[in-house]
Amino acid sequence: MIRVAHIFLITLLFWSCTSASKSTRTKPLIVATTSILADGIQALVGDQAEVVALMPAGVDPHLYKASVRDLDLLTQADLVVYHGLYLEGKMTEIFEKLAKQQALIDVSKGIPTDRLIRSGPESHSVDPHVWFDISLWSAALAYASQELQIWQPSWQPQLQANTQAYLQQLDSLDQRTKAQVQELVQRKQVLVTAHDAFAYFGKAYGLPVYSLQGLSTLSEPGLRDLTELIAIIQTYQVKAIFAEQTISPKALQAVARGAAEKNQVVKLAGPLYTDSLDAPNTPAGTYIGMFETNLQLIYSQLLP
Ligand SMILES: [Zn+2]
């Protein structure tokens, strides 16, 4: 079955390479895997390229499998940009194949390895949710900017100016986040979410974070996980727990019911935007907007 898929992919890559649509474009086409990444790359390149997100808003990147249409889009692109760190867990093989024939940027290469959070020694046990520490996301985009300048040397002045302006915006977002989260920390609040997307957020801003599922959404939470989380909610007298836009709220609803049975009323708030932006032209439709939306929701629900 795997072999058949390989042959199919190779055939498709060959077919796509021989089609002519690359030459008919007025601007280079950059395909970024997620809406979060596409937004960052768009901020860097401005109107010099068309930037497209492979995964639509609301889609879980851990579980995402590229369709035949996606493979066509990836091979048609002049440049493919991806998160790396196995966030796009089911696309690793595709990136390896694309690397042989196409310009590719893995933005995680911009992050110092000593700042990565690991749950074990294996390469796939690195936490990929680096965009929740704004300073790490800035490092990833600064690296992407350098690679873009190598890819299109004539864009260098514009890329440098755009990068500097955008990183300044991110820095002020970082300062606002620190101030608001500090208030929650002082009031002994904790953040409880569906899957483990906020470890970098917790580490960067000092807020203790607990979740029902691990780094990926692949594994199902068990009864023990539910019981442990209910105990944490009781211990910290947690007022609200947070659903996520890309994950079914069912398991967290069970946690809220379980807590209520133990006389700890907890509100199921959300959703937080974790692994995808909201639809374009909505408040959480950009990275900065998504971050602000999450921050205000967490702040307003947890502040006693
Ligand atoms: Zn995730």
Image: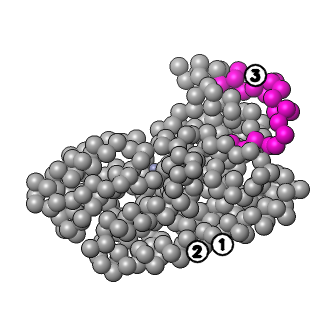
Residue 196 falls left or right of residue 233: right
Residue 238 falls left or right of residue 114: left
Please tell me in which quadrant of the rendered image residue 160 appears.
bottom right
Tag 1 and tag 3, C-beta contact below 8 Å: no
Query: Among all residues in the image, which is located at the extreme right?
Result: 154
Secondary structure of residue under mark 2:
helix
Q: Which residues are magenta?
A: 9-31
Instruction: Estimate the x, y position of residue 111 in percent, counting from the top left.
Output: 61, 63
Height in image: 232 above or below 68? below
Please tell me in which quadrant of the rendered image residue 170 appears.
bottom right
Residue 27 can be seen in this image: yes
Q: Per the image, is 32 magenta?
A: no
Instruction: Estimate the x, y position of residue 251 in percent, counting from the top left.
Output: 27, 45
Disc on the earlier residue, 1 or 3: 3
Q: CA distance from mark 1 to mark 3?
A: 43 Å
Display colour scheme: one colour
Tag 2 and tag 1, C-beta contact below 8 Å: yes
Query: Between tags 3 and 2, which lies in front?
Result: 2
Q: Which residue is mark 1?
A: 168
Please count the marks in the image. 3
Front-most of residues 117 and 265: 265
- The kind of residue tagged 3 is Trp
Q: Which mark is residue 172?
A: 2
Instruction: Estimate the x, y position of residue 212 in percent, counting from the top left.
Output: 31, 52
